[in-house]
């Protein structure tokens, strides 16, 4: 069973050794570029080129879901913002690709920001974990198909009240896979055209997905994450992923949160025929058993001369099932909102 460890001062030590494991708080020095990429030395610029990093936020409200990302692949950068109306079952999306000085991904989460700037499209994710929050600033102009979007959202990731998932797993014995996941209360407001949605902290939830990884040229992952409140008003959430890491019994990012307290889980297995048909997910320790019913999907395909390829499918919908906690108590999960994802890449 994975145990939460005290977070070291550095992700990678001065001799190049990586601190693999599951940690209590995000790294203040997330120096992944000091880690080896191969079994032989390569220039730092090549390691930086192979590094893929992003911050993704999903905001769940009683009436809407908002998904947004700033993603740096090094050969290009990508960003999207989409809004899903849960009552009307409608969705719209703004998306851009830029590179160079138009985007930046935060080096760490305590006092740094991600930004993506394009014509008529501006996202800024301010990370202020020293003060217990993240601030999302959204300013996107309207186009022929989508309304303008303007908003400010505060995500209350208080490390004194919420235990995040901080995981460093080995893709190879020396190549790290780093992720930070958490579900936390959200507040603020957002304008979709002339429609204002006010986010109340006691009913709205943010899903956070931060990642910095030397992905292999060929990669894949299946992912699920969701959050909601139970009848007692406690925040329930989970994160599940099956990817290219071979030893996924102990090196994984699978966990469940109950009112801010994390429980680490064993490997997960996904069962589905098509992304828009029902999914089943079950951890090999038998603690988490889920059924996912998709309501919609965000999908994207990229093929650049057969060399760079991405087949991305991210359905969103409702999860039901059960979680057995460390005391053996079975906690029901009934129609909480979340995401699933099936992604195959060559980059």
Image (cartoon, helix red, strand yellow):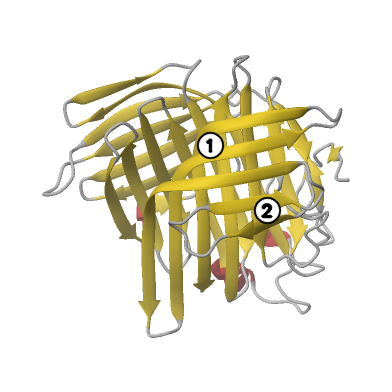
325 to 10, vertically: above or below: above
Q: List x then y, in percent, for residue 117.
A: 31, 48
Q: Tell me the residue at 63%/44% (across/down).
A: 290
Between circles 2 and 1, the one closer to the viewer is 1
Horizontal arrangement in the rendering, residue 171 relative to residue 198 (left or right)? right
Horizontal arrangement in the rendering, residue 219 relative to residue 276 (left or right)? right
Q: List x then y, in percent, for residue 43.
A: 65, 74
Callout 1 secondary element: strand
Instruction: Kindly give the residue lying farthest to the left in the view shown.
Output: 144
Question: Visible in this render: residue 55?
Answer: no
Callout 2 secondary element: strand
Horizontal arrangement in the rendering, residue 44 relative to residue 17 (left or right)? left
Q: List x then y, in percent, for residue 147.
A: 17, 39
**Residue behind mark 1:** 207
Rounded to the nearest angstrom, the CA distance separating label 2 from label 1 is: 17 Å
Question: Visible in this render: residue 235?
Answer: yes
**Residue behind mark 2:** 178
Q: Tell me the residue at 62%/33% (across/down).
A: 237
Q: List x then y, in percent, for residue 1.
A: 88, 45
The first of marks 2 and 1 along the sequence is: 2
């Amino acid at each position: 069973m994975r145990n939460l460890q005290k977070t070291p001062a550095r992700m990678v030590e001065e001799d190049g050794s990586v601190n693999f494991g599951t940690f209590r708080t995000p790294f203040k020095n997330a120096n992944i570029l000091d880690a080896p990429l191969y079994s032989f030395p390569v220039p730092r610029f090549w390691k930086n080129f192979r590094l893929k990093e992003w911050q993704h936020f999903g905001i769940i409200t009683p009436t809407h879901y908002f998904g947004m990302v700033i993603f740096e692949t090094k050969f290009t950068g990508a960003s999207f913002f989409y809004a899903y109306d849960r009552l009307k079952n409608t969705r719209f999306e703004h998306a851009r690709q830029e590179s160079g000085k138009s985007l930046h991904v935060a080096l760490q989460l305590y006092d740094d920001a991600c930004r993506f700037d394009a014509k008529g499209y501006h996202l800024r994710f301010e990370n202020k974990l020293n003060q217990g929050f993240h601030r999302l600033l959204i300013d996107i102009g309207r186009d022929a198909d989508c309304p303008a979007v303007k908003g400010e959202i505060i995500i209350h990731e208080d490390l004194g009240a919420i235990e995040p998932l901080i995981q460093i797993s080995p893709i190879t014995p020396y190549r790290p896979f780093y992720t930070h996941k958490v579900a936390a209360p959200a507040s603020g407001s957002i304008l979709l055209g002339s429609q204002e949605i006010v986010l109340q902290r006691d009913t709205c939830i943010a899903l956070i997905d931060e990642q910095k990884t030397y992905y292999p040229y060929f990669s894949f992952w299946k992912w699920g994450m969701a959050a909601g409140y139970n009848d007692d008003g406690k925040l329930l959430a989970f994160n599940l992923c099956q990817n290219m890491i071979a030893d996924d019994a102990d090196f994984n990012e699978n966990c469940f949160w109950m009112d801010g307290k994390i429980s680490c889980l064993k490997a997960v297995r996904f069962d589905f025929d098509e992304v828009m048909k029902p999914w089943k997910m079950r951890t090999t320790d038998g603690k988490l058993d889920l059924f996912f019913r998709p309501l919609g999907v965000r999908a994207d395909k990229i093929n650049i001369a057969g060399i760079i390829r991405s087949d991305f499918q991210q359905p969103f919908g409702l999860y039901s099932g059960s979680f057995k906690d460390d005391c053996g108590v079975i906690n029901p999960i009934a129609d909480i909102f979340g995401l699933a994802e099936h992604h195959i890449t060559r980059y």
